[in-house]
Image (cartoon, coloured by chain):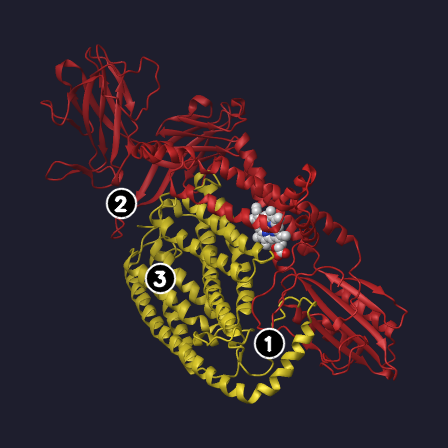
Amino acid sequence: MPVINETLGQYSELFMLLAASTYTVAFIAFAWDLAKSSKALRAIDLKAAATAEAERVPVAAGRAALAGPDAGGPAGRAERPTSGVTVEGGTAAGDMRYTAARRVPARVAVALTVLGALIHAAGVLTRAFGAGRVPWGNMYEFLTTGAFVAIAVFLVVLIRRDLRFLGTFVVGLAIIMLVAASIAFWTPVGHLVPALQSYWLIIHVSIAVLSSALFTLTFAMSALQLVQSHRQKSLAAGRPDKLGFMRLVPNALSLENLSYRINAVAFVGWTFTLMFGAIWAEKAWGRFWGWDPKEVWTFVIWVVYAGYLHARATRGWTGTRAAWLSIIGYACVIVNFTLVNTVLNGLHSYSGL
Amino acid sequence: MSESVKAKKNSTAGNTPEAAEETGSSAVDRAKSEAALPALGIKGMLRWSWTQLTSMRTALFLLLMLAVGAVPGSLFPQRAANAAIVTQYIKDRPTIGPIMDAVQLFDVYSSAWFSAIYILLFISLIGCVTPRAIAHYKALRSKPPRTPKRLSRLPEYGTLVLPADAGIPASKAITDAAGLLKKRGYRVDIRDADGALPSVGAERGLIKEVGNLVFHTALIGVLVSVAVGGLFGYSGQRILVEGDTFVNTLVGYDQFTPGSNFQSGWLQPYSVQLNSFQATFDHETPGKFGQPIDYTAEVTTKESPDAPAQKQVLKVNDPLSLGGTNIYLTGNGYAPMVTVRDGQGNIALQGPVVAKVQGANYYSSVVIKVPDAKPDQLGFVGFFLPTAFATQDGVSFSGDPELLNPQLNLNSFYGDLGLDKGVPQNVFELNVGNLKPLNGRNLPNKAITLTPGHTVTLPDGKGSITFDGVRKYVGLDVHNNPGQLYALIFGLLAVAGLVTSLYVNRRRVWVRTGTHEDGRTMVEYGLLARGEDHRLAGEAAALRELFAREWNVAGEPDTTSPVNPDAPNAVSSSTTKDQ
Ligand code: HEM
């Protein structure tokens, strides 16, 4: 049995609080960026509208001719601006790549998030060393480690794609998770109960947490997709733009395409979660499937996202409806974590409550 | 294009993606079936239902129904998990309880409606996979689709110009291109090799569809494996006190659940003797006092009655494998050793009594039935505390899971235990209806409090009870599931299929060459993806580089018009329309 180091545990809690505070400042910076950039984009838009009106029409017409009525525009042929102009049709560039535009608040926000993540990592590590094991053995640890993974995944994706428009969302969620962990689910560092002493804890839970982090990103994107698609429709109908901050957000189709790609990865991850869970259940309880509440909900999540993947291939179910399925899937992830661990009793009563 | 292609279209407003294809043939079937709806005979009706059932939309609907249908099983107690809780649950809700029971809310996963959902889903699955498999088998054996007239309409398109002095005629360029594509893993087919406009059609990633088919077929395999486990497997429970031996026969079990096709001859009579059991508890970490840290059971096993004995260690998460079964450590507790003498002074019972853990720190309930006591049968109910404490109001509790101050607290009864009538009874419950109390909290003869080594004499000369000591017991679960291994294999197959299906890209490439009046060889190529493919542009760029290197021309996009005279001049350069 490893020795429990309570001093490290206390440091860990301090780091968690520091991380939460840093994230809070980052959150403010992200929100500021949303407000400021959408204002700036609006100004560019207005100017561009005046000067480029004449040039733009033929280009658009050319594109329309290219797509043709019967060509059935090939996959992913989203129209992309080729110049540095970031705004087209009231939405940001669909490829979510970085542009030359300088967004100081966004840079500050990302820098703060990185700082927060470093402190957060220290918190997770000290917890792990304090307990002498992986830091995911109870609700407190799921939340603190899960929040870290969500932030880390977000930052990793940020290297390749400009998803800073998701910043308020992801960082906000991490703050909620850290606060919930410290207030509602606080648990001191301790040993694992025998039922959790298995290498499957390392494999099964880490993949579950990672997949959940990815689902978190796609949930945010699907929610924005719904808003954006609504906004695009009303813009197309010539109504005034009431959701100006959504200028910073790419068009609905691009959001859908990227969230599909992330969901596909997360779905494979969740399939592994389910399978490894089953293998572990067989090792621990002698049956690989028993419809325990945790198993039920893991299965429900899997089936909902399988439905999402099907929807993407079903006439009339792409776009908005698929986005709703992605959102429902995430709601199930939340239920699986909260209600199932606390209210519905099953064999998985390890939550440390 | 020769066949329907999964595609997304951007309306001019740049939003709502249009629907993608269904599987080529089923879309046609569906259209047919919808058109033919009104006048249908029985045969037509059946065919119509079949087409509906195997449509993608139905699959989606059934999938979502499966998710919804699974939920109630987590909200309400399930018989399969704990029948006693269900009985109590219904008793507590006299009106709604029976109704819930009637709609099988307590047996969700074996209910008619849940079964209906998944059976329909799997029929739909079979109906979906079979024609797709046939179609794909044909696709595998046929040549890449014919070259479209206008390559420039494809999502990825580009041209290359080979100068006249390079000496590469159109026919040579096309065989070069075909060779390059082949090396890159494409199946290629050259058309019109010696014509004016020779072309090559190439295709790769057909394994994507194989992956999809394997995935869906493997799901059927998982379901069948689970069914096999239910038919031919069995499981049982046994509580084993230190020193005792379990023999794998029907009578060896406290509880046995056979699969529907089980035969008792399948049980191999191996034996497991529990030598000792150690539990370690946390006494240091604040807030976790008394939490278990480790359970270890030392056992001696024999594969068969005459096999050599083997010492083994059984732990949680680390089952024993014996005689085709796995043996799991699923519970433990204390078994106080008692000796009961009857009114005639004879030993009527001697040995361990399994105490059922009820609360914190192994606060456990105890029931002792002594049917052999004479002249009156005796019964005891009470509790066992490994570390006894009492509050000021006399409420006893256990302060520690370890045996620091073990204590038995019992009420005693005499009379007819009701065991002689042959009605099965729960060993953990004493029906005191027909019994007369001897000792009790509120009786003149106070409840019995015993510590190890002590004896209490019962009133009225009914006998005595001695607390001899404490042993530990373990709860063992024994499982045999012949479907399990197959479920795992199919599960792994499913994952492999899924990954292949999601990450292999199915692409088509066409190259067409032609000779310009001034002697230059013009090359144009186009790429098309089936399904989502965000890396198509990357592939186009890679191909372009390969071609350019092969023919030693500039790799940069040029602005020459396409070879094909039909192509619109509007598209002139190598277009990278996606990323
Ligand atoms: C047990 C129920 C089912 C599950 C869990 C399931 C799951 C999935 C998943 C995860 C995918 C996406 C990965 C891939 O492309 O291989 C998929 C694709 C697909 N499924 Fe299913 N499926 C089920 C039943 C069905 C049924 C009944 C049908 C036919 C009616 C069907 C037809 C398809 C088709 C055509 C695709 C390919 C979609 C595409 O082109 O992207 N599936 N399925």
Q: Measure the C-alpha gap from mark 3 to mark 1.
A: 37 Å
Q: Mark 2 sits on what residue? A: B290
Q: Secondary structure at mark 2?
A: loop
Residue B522 spot, x, y in % from top left: 82, 78
Q: Measure the C-alpha gap from mark 2 to mark 1.
A: 63 Å
Q: Which mark is residue A80?
A: 1
The reply to whether residue B482 is in sight is no
Quadrant in the rendering for residue A187:
bottom left
Q: Mark 3 sits on what residue? A: A177
- Relative vertical location of residue A266 with respect to residue B217 in this rendering, above or below: below
Q: Measure the C-alpha gap from mark 2 to mark 3.
A: 29 Å
Mark 2 is surrounded, within 10 Å at the Cα level, by few (under 14), some (14 to 19) or many (20 or more) other residues, namely some
Residue at (79%, 64%) from the top-left corner? Answer: B201
Residue A321 spot, x, y in % from top left: 52, 59
Quadrant in the rendering for residue A188:
bottom left
Residue at (74%, 82%) from the top-left corner? Answer: B558
Residue at (48%, 65%) from the top-left corner? Answer: A226
Q: Secondary structure at mark 1?
A: loop
Q: Nearer the viewer, mark 2 or mark 3?
A: 3
Q: Which chain, by letter, is red?
A: B
The chain letter under disc 1 is A
In the orientation shown, which residue stands out farthest toward the right?
A: B194
